[in-house]
Image: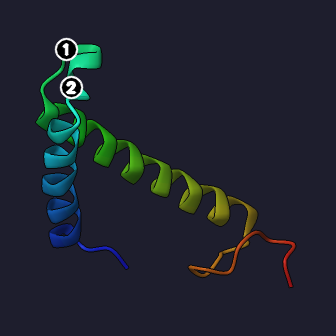
Amino acid sequence: MTNQRNLDNFETELTRLINKYSLENIANIPDFILAKHLVLALTALSMSTINRDVWYGKIQKPGEGNYDSK
């Protein structure tokens, strides 16, 4: 399971990577803001999939793939 320290480290490395390739220039948004946005989007997606699984009562374990793979 990902903890806050891992997310913080990922965000820091992502900021450096965005800066390395000058990807902040595409939208004229600072690299650290883009990195924060991407981490928040990843977190939101994770929460959405958890909520979906709870709704359907089909909790996936990490690495198990989709519901139909058995």
SS at badge 1: loop
Residue that appears at 17% across and 56% down: 13
Q: As rendered, which of 58 and 31 lies closer to the eye?
A: 31
Q: Which mark is residue 1?
A: none
Q: As rendered, which of 21 and 58 lies closer to the eye?
A: 21
SS at badge 2: helix
Q: Amino acid at mark 2?
A: Glu
Q: How many marks?
A: 2
Residue that appears at 19% across and 68% down: 4
Q: Pointers 1 and 2 in contact (CB under 8 A)?
A: yes
Q: Amino acid at mark 1?
A: Asn
* Image quarter (top left, top right, bottom left or bottom right) of the N terminus: bottom left
Relative vertical location of residue 7 with respect to residue 59 in this rendering, above or below = above
Q: Residue 19: percent from the left, percent from the top? A: 15, 37
Q: CA distance from mark 1 to mark 2?
A: 6 Å
Q: As rendered, which of 13 and 70 lies closer to the eye?
A: 13
Quick check: 58 left or right of 39?
Answer: right
Q: Answer few, some or many: residues within 10 Å of disc 1's Cα (few below 14, many 20 plus, some between 14 and 19).
A: few
Residue that appears at 15% across and 61% down: 8
Residue that appears at 30% across and 48% down: 39
Q: Residue 34: percent from the left, percent from the top? A: 23, 33
* Image quarter (top left, top right, bottom left or bottom right) of the C terminus: bottom right
Scheme of image coloration:
rainbow
Q: Residue 26: percent from the left, percent from the top? A: 29, 17
- Residue 23 picture quarter: top left
Q: In the image as oriented, which residue stretches furthest toward the top?
A: 28
Q: Which residue is mark 1?
A: 28
Q: Residue 40: percent from the left, percent from the top? A: 31, 45
Relative vertical location of residue 7 with respect to residue 39 in this rendering, above or below = below
Q: Which mark is residue 24?
A: 2
